[in-house]
Image (cartoon, grey):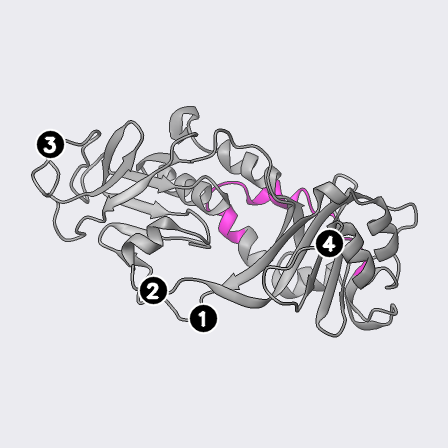
Amino acid sequence: MENGNGTAPVHDPASAPGEPGRRALVVGAGIGGLTVAAGLADRGWHVTVLERSASLEPVGAAISLAPNGQRALDRVGVGDAVRALAAWQGSGGLRAPDGRWLARTTSEEAGERYGDSLVLLHRATLIDLLRARLPEDAVRTGSAAEVVDPGAADDPRRPARVRTATGELAADLVVAADGIGSATRRRLFPGHPGPVYAGFTTWRLMVPAPAEPFPPHETWGRGTLWGSQPLHDGTVYAYAAAAVPEGGRAADDERAELLRRFGDWHHPVPALLAAADPHAILRHDVRHMRRPLPAHHRGRVALLGDA
């Protein structure tokens, strides 16, 4: 078939909306992209996930899933597998830097109130669970993708078109899950300023559990925050945040920077920092959309997640 402009033919022509064999393209194989791909596949869509990275290697640190997130994962068949990784037992809560408790709760109380307790797990673990819900050939790695025409939702003769290194693909639906720097978002809304600095930076690290046990907690200081959360596999997910100017980096290394900011806080913060690998600490400035988008879709293309 020819594209909507009557130019070169595209590969994999889309079927008309509502007909069997509807085709969806998902740009990005992160948590959002794989989740929506699994949900669409379960509902009879032919789904292809286009991921620019050469492989789905583990990236990032850990992720926390509240009960509503777990229920969302029930819809794609991985909710129970996630719940099986719950590690929170006993009490936990909010603390001050000197260790005083500001608020406490228990996993049982959280479960009674919300239906489930919080689950923390490695991001890579969740990626693996979601990837396993898709056919082997559904994810194409090393496949950068660019939306060249969002198509028209009310015109079955005008599918969305996506360009890859091997040619163009047509689809009834494109879900852009290509992250906070989304090229698709810029393509759909070129006049929008995009995300801006939110005023704070974050650090994330995975470390072995210290010898002395501790309850899960988040600790609030003045313009600073630290969290320590044990995981099912015996490691600890720690995270920190500080209100600092944009674009800063430690003159030496990020562990040294964290020690300067948090080294005199309560247990287990100093022990976790002592065990941390300076080269494995992630630091990212946090950005947000100060000005909302006019919409989260255009034509047959929808934005998802950080995009």
Kind of residue at disc 2: His
Residue at image coords 43%, 25%: 136
Q: Is residue 23 above or below residue 288?
A: above
- Which mark, residue 192? 2
Residue 81 colored in magenta in the image: yes
Q: Is residue 191 above or below residue 82?
A: below
Residue at image coords 21%, 36%: 20
Q: Position of residue 235 (x, y in %)?
A: 77, 42
Kind of residue at disc 3: Met
Q: Look at discs 3 and 4 and give the one toward the viewer.
A: 4
Residue at image coords 74%, 74%: 222
Q: Is residue 292 above or below residue 171?
A: below
Q: Look at discs 4 and 1 and give the one toward the viewer.
A: 4
Q: Is residue 255 left or right of residue 117?
A: right
User: Which comes before the other along the chain, label 3 or label 2?
Assistant: 3
- Which mark, residue 1? 3
Q: Position of residue 40 (x, y in %)?
A: 36, 42
Say which residue label 4 marks.
251
Q: Which residues are magenta?
A: 71-91
Q: Is residue 150 left or right of residue 59?
A: left
Say which residue label 1 marks.
290
